[in-house]
Image (cartoon, helix red, strand yellow):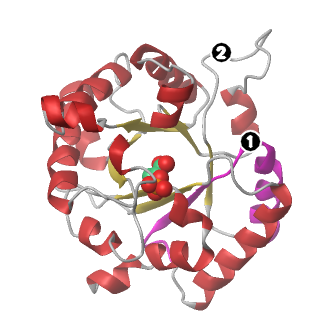
């Protein structure tokens, strides 16, 4: 029997919004969605602020009973010790983070994160009860040389090594050339690659995991194109960068059901 997957709209703030700006942003977003009664569980909203905002956002979500999930943008492969500047998954869990992004292309590019480091971060997340949002995607050179799916499929194969069949994971297909460029992938391409990534999950973790795990598309998602992605059967939501920093735009993305007429 097919499992219904709750759509997940995740906002990756990257290095934007300090902890004070975060308060105003979360309150405004909550207000925009509360008014429209869009927080009834038909879509899960995740916020991924910078580390220094997490405690503030956690406190606000708790105090105002705001049903957004909290996530971090990265974590250490280690659990504790002499690793200056690193953040343990244990600390994130204590802040009620449910999710953590691993393997974002900006970490791979600017911090030389290899597939093996990403795999170690997936293990670190799972050790601490965090759901890793595993980012994979091809550069424009990869696209030209190998087509869209070969690189993301290979990245996910490595990231899922040693992951158990009952693990909770989210996968985000993010073509590197589409991130922050204003040029999103076509819905056809997103569907094709997301379907292949689901096959990788099936191969590594089994069919049940493939059916319940959410696979997101990310890369220049906006209010104007979210519906076209959400119509695709293997796209279960979006990882949103730039547009997640604009309250009205992000709220409109979260209200995508309106655009697809659900
Ligand atoms: C991202 O960085 O994960 C992302 C998808 O960014 P943008 O939405 O700005 O393309």
Is residue 187 toward the left or the right of residue 44 in the image? Answer: left
Query: Which residue is at 42% across, 75% downward?
Result: 223
Region in magenta: 40-65
**Distance CA(mark 1)–CA(mark 2):** 17 Å
Query: Which residue is at 52% across, 76% downward?
Result: 249
Name the spot of residue 208 as percent of width and height, x first: 24, 41
- Residue 51, magenta (yes or no): yes
Name the spot of residue 132 as percent of width and height, x first: 49, 36
Image quadrant containing the N terminus: bottom left
Closest to the observer: 189 or 53? 189
Give the vertical position of 6 relative to 151 (above or below): below
Is residue 104 toward the left or the right of residue 62 in the image? Answer: left
Image quadrant containing the C terminus: bottom left
Q: Is residue 173 visible?
A: no
Tell me how many marks there are: 2
Give the vertical position of 215 relative to 188 (above or below): above
Crowding at dot 1, Cα within 10 Å, few <14 / some 14-19 / many 20+, comes out as: some
- Residue 14, magenta (yes or no): no
Q: Quadrant of residue 226?
A: bottom left
Query: Which residue is at 57% across, 23% downward?
Result: 111
Name the spot of residue 176 as percent of width and height, x first: 37, 41
Residue under pointer 1: 51
């Amino acid at each position: 029997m097919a499992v219904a997957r709750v759509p997940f709209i995740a906002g990756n703030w990257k290095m934007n919004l300090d902890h004070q700006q975060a308060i105003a942003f979360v309150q405004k977003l909550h207000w925009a969605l509360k008014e429209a009664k869009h927080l009834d569980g038909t879509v899960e909203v995740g916020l991924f602020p910078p580390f220094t905002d997490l405690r503030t956002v956690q406190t606000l979500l708790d105090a105002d009973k705001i049903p957004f999930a909290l996530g971090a943008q990265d974590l250490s492969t280690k659990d504790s010790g002499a690793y200056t500047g690193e953040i343990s998954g244990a600390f994130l869990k204590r802040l009620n983070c449910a999710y953590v992004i691993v393997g974002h292309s900006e970490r791979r590019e600017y911090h030389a994160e290899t597939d093996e480091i990403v795999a170690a971060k997936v293990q670190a997340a799972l050790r601490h009860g965090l759901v890793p949002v595993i980012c994979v995607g091809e550069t424009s050179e990869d696209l030209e040389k190998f087509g869209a799916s070969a690189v993301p499929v290979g990245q996910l194969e490595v990231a899922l090594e040693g992951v158990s069949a009952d693990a909770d994971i989210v996968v985000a297909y993010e073509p590197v050339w589409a991130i922050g460029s204003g040029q999103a992938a076509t819905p056809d391409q997103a569907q094709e690659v997301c379907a292949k990534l689901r096959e990788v999950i099936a191969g590594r973790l089994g069919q049940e995991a493939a059916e319940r795990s959410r696979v997101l598309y990310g890369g220049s998602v906006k209010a104007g194109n979210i519906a076209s992605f959400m119509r695709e059967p293997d796209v279960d939501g979006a990882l949103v960068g730039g547009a997640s920093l604009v309250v009205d735009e992000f709220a409109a993305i979260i209200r995508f059901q309106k655009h697809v007429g659900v």
